[in-house]
């Protein structure tokens, strides 16, 4: 099982702090599974119209940003922890 934690906006969208999902495969596949579970609001918050991860989104796997380790093609599986959140910018 992959343990997925939702922070900030994603906690509001999903109504959950975390969920355990049976998944062995890519981050992209996991995001598709979560999109099917949580719907278009989840998908629109995560991806732009071209299907790319939004610039301000962060997906952390076992404490490491996926952008530094293969992006959405990175694999996750049993006992991995995934955290999804959006960064906050201000001035």
Image (tube, grey):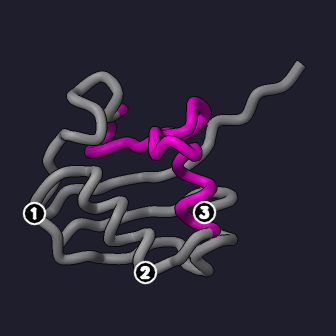
Mark-to-mark CA distance, 3 and 2: 13 Å
Say which element carries label 3: helix
* Residue 2 at x, y percent in the picture: 22, 66
Q: Residues within 10 Å of mark 1 (few under 14, many from 20)?
A: some
**Earlier along the polypeptide chain: callout 2 or callout 1?**
1
Residue under the image location 61 percent in, 57 percent down:
44
Judge from the rendering whether residue 32 lies leftward or rightward of residue 47; answer left or right: left
Say which element carries label 1: loop
Single out the residue that lies furthest toward the top.
Answer: 91
Residue 37 is marked as 2
* Residue 29 at x, y percent in the picture: 24, 59
Q: Is residue 23 above or below residue 62?
A: below
Q: Residue at label 1?
A: 24
Residue 68 is marked as none
Q: Is residue 32 above or below residue 59?
A: below
Q: Residue at label 3?
A: 10
């Amino acid at each position: 099982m992959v343990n997925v934690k939702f922070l900030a906006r994603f906690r509001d969208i999903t109504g959950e702090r975390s969920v355990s999902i049976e998944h062995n495969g890519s981050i992209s596949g996991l995001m598709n599974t979560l999109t099917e579970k949580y719907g278009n609001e989840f998908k629109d918050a995560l991806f732009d119209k071209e299907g790319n991860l939004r610039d301000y989104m962060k997906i952390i796997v076992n404490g490491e940003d996926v952008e530094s380790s293969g992006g959405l093609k990175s694999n996750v599986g049993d006992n991995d922890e995934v955290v999804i959140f959006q960064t906050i910018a201000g001035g």
